Image (cartoon, rainbow, N blue to C red):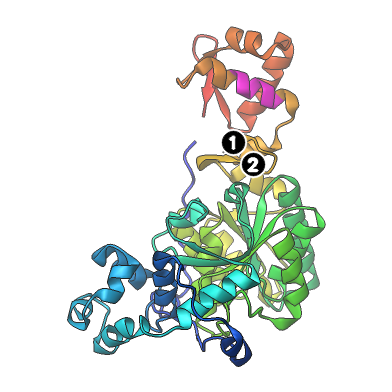
Amino acid sequence: MCRRRVDAPTVPPYKGRVVHLYTFRGLPDDLTMTQPAPTADADETLLAHVRLACVTGVGARLRQILIDHFGSPERVFTATPAELAAIPGVGPKLAAAIPAMAEVPEASRIVDVCRSRGVLIVPSGDDSYPGLLARIDDPPQLLFVRGDLQPCDSLAVAIVGARHATAYGKRVAAQLAGGLARAGYTVVSGLARGIDAAAHRGALDAGGRTIAVLGTGVLNIYPVEHADLAAEIIGRGAVVSEAPPFAEPHPGAFPQRNRIVSGLSLGTIVVEAAERSGALITARLAAEQGREVFAVPGQIDCRMARGCHGLIRDGVKLVESVDDVLEELGPLFQTTTSADGRQVRTAAELQLDDVERQVLAAVDTEAGGGDAAEIDGVVAASGLATSRVLAAIGVLEMRRILRRLPGNRVGRC
């Protein structure tokens, strides 16, 4: 099955998408004064990545351009102002600011604080960097992570929506998040008030994993009333940001972080959104990234339903239950590991019972890497009765995992 592409919803683009929008004011005074001297054995590549993250005016896309041009983040800081100024997007002030950052101890202090506060620094290309996120056009070169990112997080769905959500919207967001979590998916959102908080809480209450993507630093939780929720998320998932750990809230940073929310996810569900909202920006970014987009309908006289209704008119999948989402998600970008340690190729495999999984494994074994397997061979390999194998194959066909082929054969879709 081919992954269905949805045209990008017609919402206005946000300005400054490729510009560094985080307000970074360094470490708090008490931490700056009490931190030890920069560690001599600090990894130079990691340190250079952090330095680039601290340069105001250097956003994700420009960081990638600089690293690609010079070959490594370390080489960026040894370049002359003239060499830097030759790069499109780097003006004279920025060309002078980048080498100057190499002389500032702030990056070393950030590395030390992250180590002392349990913050992981994950550069692009690292084994623990999320594979789905690496596939977008402008992935962050650096992630600051509190908690842990696991292979099963590649089976993730984002739930986003209005901050001023209705009781209906928050209830639906929690129900969808709980259903996804019970199905084995990680729920991604932005820790904002309203729909985001309801989605995180729904996933946690269902015993699942959830990831919160911040527009601030991971040691500067915003909004502050969600500090306890963030602590729970850290224990059962992760809080992540591309901003330095104490970065402050900035209006432009939140639209920029939305590309990470959608980039971490196979699909994005919008639950309540006004006609102009950050949730619609996330939906547009998801469509541009080749990910699925879903929308929950609302009351026709509710202002917070207009954005979702517009998405539905644009052709995105209408969601009435979690089954609508699970049925739409097709083959994964790559074989991945589920939360219970199974290797899966499609999201639908998370919904299989023991017999269906046994039959699917027998098909893969008999196919031996080829396109098809004889049904008689599948029966023999599974050790099950023919009637049970045929029934399981019927279910796997309906879930669009297997397809019937001529000659009494079956193969992967």
The kind of residue on which mark 1 rests is Val
333 or 85, nearer to the observer: 85
Q: Quadrant of residue 188?
A: bottom right
Q: Quadrant of residue 103?
A: bottom left
The span picked out in magenta is 356-362
Q: In percent of the image, x 59 and y 53: which residue is there? A: 317
Q: Secondary structure at mark 2?
A: loop
* Above or below, 302 relative to 263: below
- Can I make out residue 7 in this image? no
Q: In percent of the image, x 58 and y 81: which residue is there? A: 246
Of the numbered discs in the image, which one, if any, rests on residue 338? 2
* Above or below, 399 relative to 305: above
- Residues at marks 1 and 2 touching, judged by CB atoms closer than 8 Å: yes
The kind of residue on which mark 2 rests is Ser
Q: Is residue 333 magenta?
A: no
Q: Main secondary structure of the magenta part?
A: helix
Of the numbered discs in the image, which one, if any, rests on residue 344? 1
